[in-house]
Image: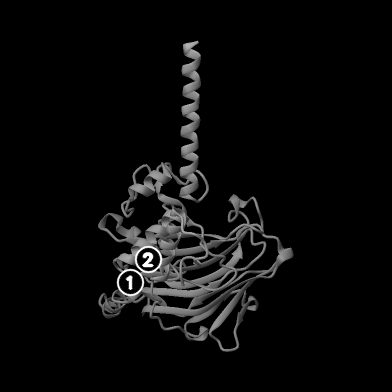
Amino acid sequence: MGLLSCSISETITPSLLFFFLFCFIGFGTATFNVTTLAFDEGYNPLFGDGNLVRSPDGHSVRLLLDVYTGSGFISSRMYQHGFFSAKIKLPSDYTAGIVVAFYTSNGDVFEKNHDELDIEFLGNIEGKPWRFQTNVYGNGSTNRGREERYNLWFDPSKEFHRYSILWTAKNIIFYVDEVPIREVVRNDAMGGDYPSKPMSLYATIWDASSWATNGGKYKVNYEYAPFTSEFKDLVLDGCAIDPIQKFPNSTACSETDTWLESRDYAVITPKSRSAMRRFRQRYMYYSYCYDNVRYPITPPECAVDSNEKQRFRNTGRLRFGGSHRKQARMERARRKRRSRAASVSDDQTDM
């Protein structure tokens, strides 16, 4: 799956050249070699059982949100590291206030010091696109959210796309299709903030009217219900483990970890790293790493990119929408206005 739908039907201009280069990188990313599971082979209903609908062949599931309840499922086992993946199709039309989440967590076992890796899709009013965010919590560090927010290069309600989370002892990678969009590399300075305890995989759809769309300005409108999210080609690669063993075996997952770290999805090639850089340039519109208001001292896991830092200034947010090109145009316009103002001032001084 490419980053964009590409067709050569126009005369190539410098801007189109960038477009085609971006497409080429996306299409050059190979499909991952994964083994999928039927729903009953790896998952159980979590809540809203009546709104969880399995397909006849058992290989896909629909999660519904209506005025009575949302719904969700959970992996049957907990995992000490793994690759968690699914092809997902989101609800269409008016989806404000809705959150569809695909994430790992151990909050039901470690209530006060849980770990979590999130992909959360945030709905919108009709005609406006879905957005999504990723987040990382370790050892209950919910007061130190590590969120990044993005747009997508496609409409996620029109067709299925694969979303994935890789979690190893060394790093965490979030993927959209086979394009890495974010990597968190473990280092000693993170300490317990790096997720380290066994986690389950969750998928949910729920009413988040209080915050999901424009800070809660737009609520879920149940005239459009039921809202349906679909999941298929489910993947659970990792070391299944009992999280509450009295004497856990520290080497129990070493063989699986070695296998996991050798997989194609665990290696960011130069080509896929270039695709990740381009995705972040074009589609990321918030990063905590550049939010000096929340974090005057940059968190230790942040790999600060000078180009990203310049674009996000000190707030972590793009100043003008999500496009760095638009931001550049606005900056040029401001410089012209300042130049004209200075010219007028000089003319008045000469009078």
Q: Position of residue 249 (x, y in %)?
A: 27, 77
Q: Is residue 146 visible?
A: no
x and y percent of residue 29 in the render? 38, 71
* Residue 160 visible in image: yes
Q: Amino acid at mark 1?
A: Ala
- Circle number at residue 173: 2
Residue at the image position 71 percent from the left and 64 percent from the top? 222
At label 2, the amino acid type is Ile
Q: Residue 231's quadrant in the figure?
A: bottom right
Frontmost residue, 236 versus 266: 266
Residue 181 lies in quadrant: bottom left
Q: Earlier in the sequence, mark 2 or mark 1?
A: 2
> Is 321 displayed left or right of 272 in the figure?
right
Residue 218 in the figure: left or right of residue 312: right
Identify which residue, 77 or 96, lies in the foreground.
96
Decide if residue 233 is on the left or right side of residue 127.
Answer: left
SS at mark 2 in the image = strand
Question: Which residue is tagged 1?
Answer: 266
Residue 49 lies, with reference to residue 96, above or below; the image says below
Circle 1 — which element?
A: helix
Q: Examine the rendered structure and indicate whether residue 301 appears above or below residue 200.
A: above
12, above or below 340, in the image: below
